[in-house]
Image (cartoon, grey):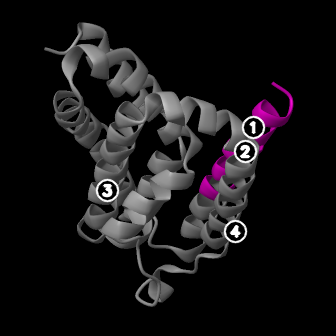
Amino acid sequence: MLDPSFFSYVTVMSITPGPNNLMLATSGVNFGMRRTLPMLLGIMIGCAIQTAIAGLLLEVLLVWMSAIRLPLTLLGAAYLLWLSWKIFRSGAPELREKAQPMTLLGGAMFQAINPKAWLMATNVALMYTASSGILTVMIGFMALNLPCILIWAAMGDRLGKHLQVAWKLRVFNTVMALSLMATTLWMLVEVIHP
């Protein structure tokens, strides 16, 4: 049985802004809910897999994470800055047919460099897998994570209907790109100057 604090922790970590939710809202705006669903499911599956990895390899992971924290953060930051640039450069509504949303595999693989997802997975594994078991934690995690990230994709989908004018979409994509860039820079500052 899962500890009650598990529900609040996973819900808060899943629904608060971070790279996943910014990407889901942006994809919802630019591609709509239906085309964003594979990415959303990939994120949910990727986070659950991270939690399982952290739970199964916790002792090794903690030693390993301290050794590769800075390189992993720099790699993740470079990718997030590249994504920020791609979001900033996204085109007008008529150009969206050429662009493609992240796939299920892409959403799952994105978790490998998402620092917030690693923090969440490691904390969940540390706090809950020993008492509840990995499978229970994974199922509970996916059940709580899905509605939280669905809100971001749905919000983006609904907002996208109001952003069919090129300049409005440009403003939205610029704000989202700057938000992702600010998140990335904050992450870098935290790692470099703890």
Distance between the alpha carbons at the discs numbered 3 and 1: 24 Å
Q: Are marks 2 and 4 in contact (CB under 8 Å)?
A: no
Please report whichever mark, 3 or 1, sits nearer to the chain's N-terminal start: 3
Residue 110, position in %: x, y?
A: 48, 59
| Image location of residue 23, percent across then percent down | 48, 56
Residue identifier under label 3: 40
Element on which disc 3 rests: helix
- 136 lies above or below 31: above
Look at the image and tell me in which quarter the N terminus lies.
Answer: top left
Where is residue 125? Give x, y as percent. 38, 26
Can residue 113 be found in the magenta stretch? Answer: no
Residue placed under numbered mark 1 in the picture: 186
Q: Nearer the viewer, residue 186 or 177?
A: 186
What residue is shown at x 23% (from left), y 10% (from top)? 3
Residue at the top extreme? 4
Residue on which disc 2 sits = 182
